[in-house]
Amino acid sequence: MSHQPSKIKTIAYWVTTILGPTSFVIGGSLFVLHKQEQIDTLAQLGYPEYLLTILGIWKLLAVIAILVPRFPRLKEWAYAGFFFELSGATLSHLLNSDGLALASQPLLFLVLVMASWALRPPSRRLASRSGY
């Protein structure tokens, strides 16, 4: 029975990771392929189309970094990238007066990414350093 909280945390980690960071495989692919909906959204927000390629590649690389074993510092950078991209998308929609419905979509993924980060197992974390 003592393993139950650990098992629940592991399941919660993988559920939030699959729904959050791993879902960026789809988004990153759509960006890299310059699908029309993504082109239209970026244009509406005032961003250039080439940003799709840059963000798409980074999203796909970040998913790989989060899913592969080891490399905890790289995972931290990937989570930080997701945080900046999703918070930026949320603010872009709000500042563009797109309304809460559009702004809440990246915000929901941000919550999932943050939960994945908070629930990650010790093997996927940076080791603590004393003396700081």
Image (cartoon, rainbow, N blue to C red):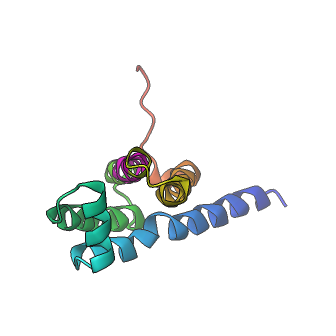
| Left or right, 127 with reference to 121 | left
- Image spot of residue 88 (x, y percent): 36, 47
Quadrant of the image containing the N terminus: bottom right
Task: Inspect this view and state whether residue 126 appears.
Answer: yes
- Image spot of residue 50 (x, y percent): 14, 64
- Image spot of residue 37 (x, y percent): 33, 75
Q: Nearer the viewer, residue 88 or 40?
A: 40
Quadrant of the image containing the C terminus: top left
Q: Which range of residues does the magenta coloring cover?
A: 80-92
| Left or right, 82 with reference to 15 | left
- Image spot of residue 59 (x, y percent): 31, 64
Q: Residue furthest right?
A: 1
Q: Nearer the viewer, residue 18 or 100?
A: 100
Point 27% across, 79% down: residue? 35
Q: Nearer the viewer, residue 95 or 28?
A: 95
Quarter of the image where one finds residue 44: bottom left
| In the depicted structure, whether residue 92 falls above or below residue 11 | above
Task: Inspect this view and state whether residue 121 appears.
Answer: no
Q: Nearer the viewer, residue 64 or 69?
A: 64
